[in-house]
Each structure stands twice: as C-alpha cells, then as structure tokens.
Image: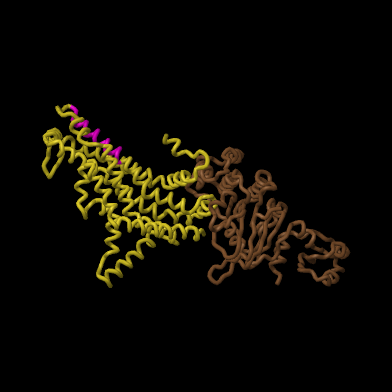
Chain colours: A yellow, B brown
Amino acid sequence: MLASLIKINGYSPFKALMLREYWENRRAIFMTPLVITAITMALVIISMGIFGRAIHINGESYTLGEVIAEMSSRKTGELSDHINHLLLFSSIPVMIGVWFCMVFTALGSLYDERKDNSILFWKSMPVSDFQTILSKILTVTLVIPMVAIGFTLVFQVFLLIIGSFYTIGTEYSAWDLMWSSTNLPLLVLNEMIYMIMYSLWALPIFAWFFLASVIAKRTPLLVATIPVALIALFEGLFFHSDYLVRFIGMRISGAHIMGSEHGYAQNFTKLDPMSTLEILQSAASPAFWMGLAVAAALLTATILLRRRNSL
Amino acid sequence: MTNIITAQNLSKSFGSFQALKNINLTIQKGQIVGIIGANGAGKTTLLNSILGLSSYDGDLDVLGYAPYTQRDEMMKHICFISDVATLPKWMKVCEAIDFVEGVHPSFDRAKALGFLSGTSVPLDKKIRKLSKGMVVQVHLALIMSIDAKILVLDEPTLGLDIIYRKKFYRQLLEDFFDEDRTILITTHQVDEIENILSQVIFIREGNIVLAADMEDIGQQWMVLNPSQENIRAARALSPVSEQTMLGRTSFIFNGKERSTLAELGEVSRVSLSDLFITLMDGE
C-alpha cells in the first residue's frame, strides 16, 4: 500500500507535489528522526551496559529487581501514569530535532528554489502557486511531525521491549507491568492530536517563515528574525509591553496546548480521553482563530509574491 | 492559419526602465520562430511575459489564456527550457520523470524513457552528478515527451559544446516538431538556428525592429559583393550597410531588385547574423 502511495502513476498533480517535497526534504522528514531515534536507542543500550542492573533514582541506587518490585507495588493507575510519562518524555529528543527541521524547511522552502534557479522548472509545470505552497506548508506542519510520531512510536515500543527483558527471571509479568498499563494506540493518537494542534497554533509563525523565505535575497533566517526583533524592541521601548514576544513565544513553544496557561499538561499526560478533548477545546478560543487568520493572510501574501518574483 | 500568440501594446517596465515598449506581435501555429536581439534587448522579458512568469501591461493572448493569471492551466500546453540549468540538482532523473508524469496530463513516460535509453544518462543519479550535456538531454527528453502546443527555448544550448548543440536541434526537429506545434527560440548562436527557423523577430531596446518570414527575408534582403570597379555604383544604390573585410567590400540591401544588383557583382542571401548586426547598428 505504501509503495503505491509513493509511486506516481499517471496524472495526479497534488500527489506529485507532495512527493516532490518528500524527495527534496528527505533529510528533514525521514533521516533526522531516524538518526535521533537510532542514537537514543544506542544510548539506552550503552547506559544499560554501564549501569548494569542498577538504577539511580534521587541519588540512591536500586537494583532493577527492586525497581520492578516497587513499580508493581504501586496502584495500577499510578503505574500507568509513570509508564505513560516515561513513554511521552522519550519522544522529546525526536520532537526537538524535528522542530528544527520544521523551522529550517519552512525557511528554505521558497528560497532554495530561487537560489538554484529551479523555480523556472517548477513554474514551467502546470501547477499553481497556491497548490505548490499548500504542498509545502502541509509538508512542514503535518508530514514532518507525523513521520516523527511514527519514529517515537518505534522508540516507545523499543523501551517497552527493553523493560520487558528486565522482567525475565523475576516473578513479575511484563504484560501486566508494561504493556497493559499503557495504551499505545491512545498514546499515539494523543501525540498526533497534540502535534496537529501545535501546528495549527504555530501556523502564523510558520507562515511568517514562508513569507521570509519568498522575500529573502539571502539568509531567510535573518529576514525572518531581524524585523521581528526590531519591532519587539520598539514595542518594549515605547509601549513598555511585550505582546509580540509573548504572541510568538507562546505559539512556537506550544504553550497553548501544553496548557502551561490552563493546566492542560497534567491531563494530557494522564492519557485520559477527556484530556485529548481538552486539547481540542483550545480551538474554541478566539486567539486560535485569530492566529489562523494571520496565517492565511501571510500565506496569501506568500502566494502572490511567488507568482510575481519568479526570477 | 491560426494565431496562437497575440500581443497588443505589450509593455513591461522595471522601475523607470522600459524593457518592452508597446509590442504588437502575432505568431501562428506551425512556425519555428527565432527571437533575436542583443543582451538586454528584451527577449527574455518577452518570453517571460508569454510564459506567465512576469506581469505586463497591454493585451497578451497565448492559446486563449491570459498568461500571468492563468499560468497553471496554460502550462498544460506549453513547455519551456530556459538558459540556465533549471532542473533541481537534488532530484534524481527518475524522480524528475515521476514528477512530470504526475503534474502533466499529456506526458508520455515511455517516450521519455525511450529518449533517455539512447543516451548514457543514468536514471538513478541525481541531476547534480550529471554533466551539463546530460542535464540538457534529460530536460529535452522530459519536454519532448509532453504533447505540448508551444515549446519555448531561451538560450537552450548555452554552455554546451558543438556536438551537443547539433544533436539538440536535430532531435528537436526530428522528434518534436510538426505542423501542429510551434517553437520559439532565442539564442546568441544565430547561425546554428538559421536553417531551421521559419520566422524571425528582431528585438532592439524593447521594440520589434523586424518581424518576417525567413522566405521574405531572403527575397527582401540581399548581400552584394561588387567587383572593385562597381563599388561606387553600389554605394549609389543606397545600401543599408557597408562592410569592408580583408579588402573586400560588401553591401547589404533591402528591397532592391535582384537583377539590378547582379549587374554590379555577386549577390547572395544575407545571413541572420549579418542582418542582426545591420539592424542593431542602424539608427
């Protein structure tokens, strides 16, 4: 199925555009999370070798047997919380790496094609600037994070397997201790909703990167950051406020969904279906829609500029 | 004959610089049109307007489309190779074929693979790894496998050696061109395309100075190499230009009777490059 999905067979312009993005950004989409996952797996295995069967928690050393015994003595709910926390935190390295990929892919998206003149080739094809930019923004804000979630799932399964190994030869069952106390599909679903909501909240920022990318004569990163820094400085000096910095900071850090404002975070890590609902509920706030409107305006400007600035 | 490109009062300015000045132009189906002019004369600007790559003032109709606003629809029927290597360097040859197949409704994959099988281009290599000649072959193979009505070539052979250049034009004529298609070419190597053109447009400083069929040019414009004693008489017939090289003087005439000139010396067809120089030097 995957093979037919990534194979062009006759006329299907949008699919071709999406594939084109994959070919161009293979490194950001695939290689980065792969490498990070491989490295963290290797680190886990190495540290097992170094620390043997002892685990240090709060400066005290426990044997793994003790840890497992301790774990299994916890209440089911508590245990499940711990494991879910662990699994969730295990996705942080990939997510951080992938976040940089999203930013730099966005910044290069409409700049690289002008730098290497390939824009003339793309423009000689019967696809509109709207379709092209849609394919690019979807790649940055949806494809890259979704593939990353696939890799975090691999890593989470890996951790559970490693954990299960430790129960071999003990009286505890890996199934009870590890596998049944978490709900991987629900975890993945939550991560996906989280990522999508993150992308939607952060969309005005990424749209701004696109605009910088289509304008920049060189170094889109500077074009994206310097004006913002100047305006923020201006705002601070003359109005003694920091709306712009807060707007950007909260959206790019995912504060709206992490719930550092509203206390969503706790619920999220509990993996209660309700918490997913609450993440979705952040879409009810006017700020969410205002952000999307800003993103739409920035992307429209980007489309118009790409149509004009072909050379 | 059907007009496939019609321009009326086509203008384009960059700031205070007027790159195209009220150009009127019609191009018909089944022609191979050379657009000739010095650097900065407005050739590329004209092509970019026709291709919908830049905005313009005035009326422009290409196959019934307004190029700038309907570029994506129009490009289903137009192919374009520009002067600079535009195939993305990170792409593999097979990916480029896949992509064009995906976005072009009238692309024939088998045809493209057929063209490439006659070359040494490796399909699994990135464009970056190919020689300049190979890149052009890939681009040409892609373009010629699209059933397009218009092919636009902007300095297509720039930087290629003579063997590739010859091959390029031969392939173009043999495998692409027929009476339903139209080719627009700009190039500095005027001599190379002279034999294949059916129509020529000279552009100078944003104006069309001459647009004519090659046949008409052959009848209108002549070169006279008069014998030494007839030079004065030739000059009296008010030639458009006079050139002396290695002691031989030659004159270019416009619209004179061939028989009148033949009395003074040897009359021959004017080459496009000589005509180009004459038109560019004139007032």
Whether A255 is among the magenta residues is no
**Vertical placement of residue A74 versus B172, above or below:** above
Asked if residue A193 lies left or right of residue B95, the reply is: left
Residue positioned 30% across, 63% down in the render: A244
Asked if residue A215 lies left or right of residue B193, the reply is: left
Query: How many marks are shown on the rendered structure?
Result: 0
**Vertical placement of residue A217 versus B95, above or below:** below
Which region shows up in magenta? Answer: A152-168
Asked if residue A69 lies left or right of residue B185, the reply is: left
Q: Quadrant of the C terminus of chain B?
A: bottom right
Question: Who is closer to the viewer here, B57 or A221?
Answer: B57
Asked if residue B33 lies left or right of residue B159, the reply is: right
The image quarter in which residue B258 lies: bottom right
Which is the main secondary structure of the residues drawn in magenta?
helix
Q: Is residue B230 shown to the viewer in this render?
A: yes
- x, y (%) of residue B19? 59, 67
Whether A166 is among the magenta residues is yes
Question: Who is closer to the viewer here, A58 or A84?
Answer: A84
**Vertical placement of residue B147 versus A301, above or below:** above
| Residue at the outermost right position | B263
- x, y (%) of residue A132? 46, 51
Residue positioned 73% across, 57% down in the render: B213
Residue positioned 54% across, 68% down in the render: B14
- x, y (%) of residue A300? 43, 58
Question: Who is closer to the viewer here, A38 or B75?
Answer: B75
Residue positioned 55% across, 58% down in the render: B68
Q: Is residue B192 shown to the viewer in this render?
A: no
